[in-house]
């Protein structure tokens, strides 16, 4: 049975089903249970927040404070504690309110969670899922609006997942919680109220598998998280111009489904990567390099990237709107690579 759920509710259901299936799954984070000690002083306020975007609402009442734990504002402490819990056999799901706060727990993630399996010769696993929030367009300024997928993706030992639909959100979160390695699960704040069909029963989507969300023949567009939806809008507009776009949602950035991406590029001969994050050392540059290294002779036009600017996310609404990639920029990038490809083919045909 499927129903229409928001991404927020799909994530909530995934957490609930994971906790019902396994008593070792526990949640930790700031304000995910209404604030420690509020049960007695303000009974009506307990579980009122459910985190900054309400994803964990209702779970405290079902599972209690032993499994839904409010923490101090100390990511260093509760991420470190989660690593210890995971080594001891539990499956903690700590929440870092915003990905911008990565620095507060980076040592734990970089030098401990990511490396312990390697350092102990495979005798230790760290089955921990770190939930965090990404994304601009929320008028939250430069310290609450970044999309720092690439910082986590750069680190071997961490798996990085970023769903764009309710169906994927539930299936990927359940898969992440069941995984034996640490997973960074990134949720875009502008997508929480996106709706879609979600089965009621538990299901998983294997990490490292991309989704072809729209088939096409002329150009491959890779959309990163929220940019999947923007790419689909652009593809619809380009279809009216006689251009057929294949849109791919990687869903998982580490591991990355290179086979699906390269197969599409080799067939269409053109690539546009749309990534909200900064352009330097980003997912856009990584996927572009993948195409250049493994599909260079199949490309019939230059790879184009549509990204945010190499600047902090602006607080000014007009500047923030300019920062986030939009449909016109994607359309221009697609037309540019196709036009350059045609000019190159004509030059070869005329011996120039």
Image (cartoon, rainbow, N blue to C red):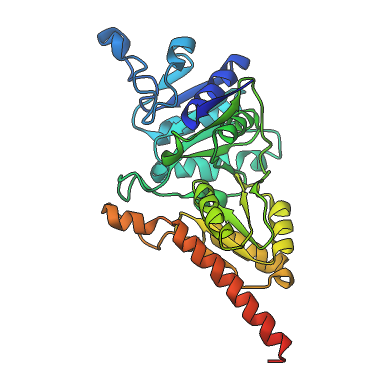
- Location of the N terminus by quadrant is top right
Residue at image position (38%, 19%) is 33
Quadrant of residue 175 within the rendered picture? top right
Q: Position of residue 320 (x, y in %)?
A: 33, 54
Q: Position of residue 153 (x, y in %)?
A: 56, 50
Residue at image position (59%, 35%) is 168
Query: Which is more toward the observer, 220 or 144?
Result: 220
Residue 258 visible in the shown view: yes
Q: Is residue 128 above or below residue 274?
A: above
Q: Position of residue 5 (x, y in %)?
A: 51, 27
In the rendered structure, the answer to whether residue 267 lies left or right of residue 79 reads right
Residue 312 visible in the shown view: no
In the rendered structure, the answer to whether residue 195 lies left or right of residue 212 reads left
Query: Which is more toward the observer, 181 or 122?
Result: 181
In the rendered structure, the answer to whether residue 155 lies left or right of residue 147 reads right
- Location of the C terminus by quadrant is bottom right
Quadrant of residue 243 within the rendered picture? bottom right
């Amino acid at each position: 049975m499927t129903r229409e759920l928001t991404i927020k509710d799909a994530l909530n259901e995934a957490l609930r089903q994971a906790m019902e299936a396994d008593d070792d799954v526990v949640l930790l984070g700031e304000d995910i249970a209404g604030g420690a000690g509020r049960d007695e002083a303000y009974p009506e306020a307990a579980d009122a927040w459910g985190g900054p975007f309400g994803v964990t609402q209702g779970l405290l009442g079902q599972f209690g404070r032993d499994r839904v734990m409010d923490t101090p504002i100390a990511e260093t402490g509760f991420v470190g504690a989660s690593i210890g819990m995971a080594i001891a056999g539990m499956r903690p799901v700590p929440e870092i309110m915003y990905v911008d706060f990565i620095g507060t727990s980076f040592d734990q993630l970089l030098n401990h969670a990511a490396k312990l399996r390697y350092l102990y010769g495979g005798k230790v696993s760290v089955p921990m899922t770190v939930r965090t929030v990404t994304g601009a367009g929320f008028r939250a300024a430069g310290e609450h609006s970044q999309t720092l997928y690439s910082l986590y993706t750069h680190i071997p030992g961490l798996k990085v997942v970023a769903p764009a639909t309710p169906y994927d959100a539930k299936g990927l979160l359940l898969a992440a919680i069941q995984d034996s390695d640490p997973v960074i699960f990134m949720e875009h704040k502008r997508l929480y109220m996106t709706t879609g069909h979600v089965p009621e029963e538990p299901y998983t989507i294997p990490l490292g598998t991309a989704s072809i969300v729209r088939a096409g023949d002329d150009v491959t567009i890779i959309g990163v998280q929220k940019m999947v939806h923007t790419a689909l809008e652009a593809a619809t507009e380009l279809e009216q111009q006689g251009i057929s776009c294949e849109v791919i949602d990687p869903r998982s950035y580490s591991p990355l489904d290179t086979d699906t991406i390269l197969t599409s590029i080799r067939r269409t001969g053109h690539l546009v990567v749309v990534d909200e994050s900064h352009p330097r050392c980003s997912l856009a540059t990584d996927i572009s390099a993948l195409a250049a290294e493994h599909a260079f002779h199949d490309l019939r036009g230059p790879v184009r990237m549509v990204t945010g600017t190499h600047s902090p996310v602006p607080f000014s609404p007009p500047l923030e709107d300019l920062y986030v990639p939009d449909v016109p920029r994607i359309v221009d990038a697609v037309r540019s690579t196709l036009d350059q490809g045609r000019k190159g083919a004509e030059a070869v045909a005329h011996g120039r």
